[in-house]
Image (tube, rainbow, N blue to C red):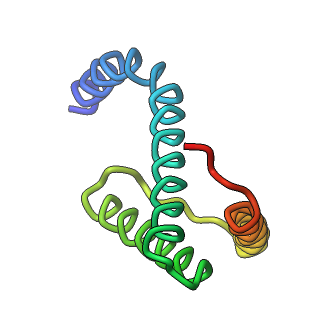
Amino acid sequence: MSTMKAEQDRKREEKEKPMAAYEPIVSSILNIIISVSIVLYNKRIFQVLHFPAPVTLSAIHSLFGYSLLSVFNVFGAFEAKSIDRPTIIKQAGIWGLSVSFDLLSLKYNSVGF
């Protein structure tokens, strides 16, 4: 019985290998598209709608991202990993700095689109 399961697993892995090679490329392209889209929407929100609170907008983006990832997790799109607390704190700090600099960039630099 376990030999048959092992054979099925091997066949499934062979089918998935060609797709796995393209995964980083596709992920990178999607990341760029989504990042540019967020910048363009932010520019529109700040300039056209005169939204007064960039930190609130970042919080909305974060909440939406967390919610969407939670939905993907429930449907099995990926497997959530356990991460130790110091790593989470370090990543949260880096993310916070990144968001802060992004907001400063939006405040002081024009987006040329």
Instruction: Please identify the residue farthest to the front as the structure is shown.
Output: 48
**Which quadrant is the N terminus positioned in?**
top left
Considering depth in this image, is 12 or 80 the residue closer to the camera? 80
**Residue 63 appears at what percent x and percent y?**
45, 76
**Residue 71 appears at what percent x and percent y?**
30, 65
**Residue 82 appears at what percent x and percent y?**
57, 65
Q: At 75% from the left edge and 74% from the top edge, which residue is drawn? A: 89
Q: Is residue 8 visible?
A: yes
**Residue 98 appears at what percent x and percent y?**
74, 63
Considering depth in this image, is 82 or 100 the residue closer to the camera? 100
Compared to residue 101, the image places residue 33 above or below, namely: above
> Residue 5 vs residue 20: left or right?
left
Q: At 48% from the left edge and 35% from the top edge, which residue is drawn? A: 27
Compared to residue 11, the image places residue 50 above or below, namely: below
Residue 14 falls in image quadrant:
top left
> Residue 8 vs residue 44: left or right?
left
Compared to residue 88, the image places residue 34 above or below, namely: above
Q: Is residue 87 visible?
A: no
Q: At 42% from the left edge and 54% from the top edge, which residue is drawn? A: 79
Q: At 50% from the left edge and 80% from the top edge, which residue is drawn? A: 51
> Residue 69 vs residue 71: left or right?
right
Considering depth in this image, is 97 or 45 the residue closer to the camera? 45
**Which quadrant is the C terminus positioned in?**
top right
Figure label count: 0
